[in-house]
Amino acid sequence: MKKQDNEFAHYCCELLATAGPCVAKRMFGGYGISTEGLTIAILADLGKGQKLWLKASQETAEQFEAAGCERFIYLVNGVTKSMSYFSAPEAAMESVHEMEPWARMALAAALAARQAKQKAIPNRNSKRH
């Protein structure tokens, strides 16, 4: 990756710091941004340049859409796919203060996704009857 991509990843970590201490790790040609082991955002270029994409839930998707944010949609072998991420609002990219509510929503969505995943995994320590 280019140096400017790495600098952008660090800048995004600073913007998202109100959700917790963030770390950017390279993945799939972009970056995953996580705090406390929870991925709250990704950096990816879907053809219009590197963008910050924030984790969303069914409950928060409407807020992202109302703010004019773009859904993370991509093509795989000619088939349209999407992930539960939305582009960050333009104004939020300017300051930590503007990003704070969006960072907290992304953290809440990541926590909810983790809880749903844990509920889906049967408890290995439970006794079978």
Image (cartoon, rainbow, N blue to C red):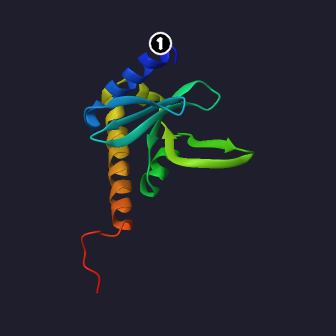
Q: Residue furthest bottom?
A: 129
Q: Which residue occupies the foreground of this view, 41 or 119? A: 119
Image mark count: 1
Q: Which residue occupies 68% across, 42% down?
A: 75
Quarter of the image with the C terminus in it: bottom left
Residue 87 drawn at (x, y percent) = 51, 36
Q: In the displayed structure, does residue 29 sit left or right of residue 77? A: left
Question: Where 34 falls versus 126 (above or below)?
Answer: above
Q: Residue furthest top?
A: 3
The residue where tag 1 is placed is 3
Q: Residue furthest right?
A: 78
Q: Which residue occupies 48% across, 19% down?
A: 5
Residue 58 drawn at (x, y percent) = 46, 57
- Callout 1 amino acid: Lys
Q: In the displayed structure, does residue 61 sit left or right of residue 81? A: left
Question: Where 49 falls versus 129 (above or below)?
Answer: above
Q: Is residue 105 at all visible to an observer of this figure?
A: yes
Question: Where 63 falls versus 32 (above or below)?
Answer: below
Question: Where 26 falls versus 39 (above or below)?
Answer: above
Residue 93 drawn at (x, y percent) = 42, 26
Q: Which residue occupies the foreground of this view, 105 or 97? A: 105
Secondary-structure class at tag 1? helix
Residue 110 drawn at (x, y percent) = 36, 49
Choose top left, top right, bottom left or bottom right for residue 120.
Answer: bottom left
Q: Which residue occupies 28% across, 31% down?
A: 17
Q: Is residue 94 at all visible to an observer of this figure?
A: no
Q: Which residue occupies 35% across, 55% down?
A: 114
- Circle 1: is it few (<14), some (14-19), or many (20+) Cα within 10 Å? few
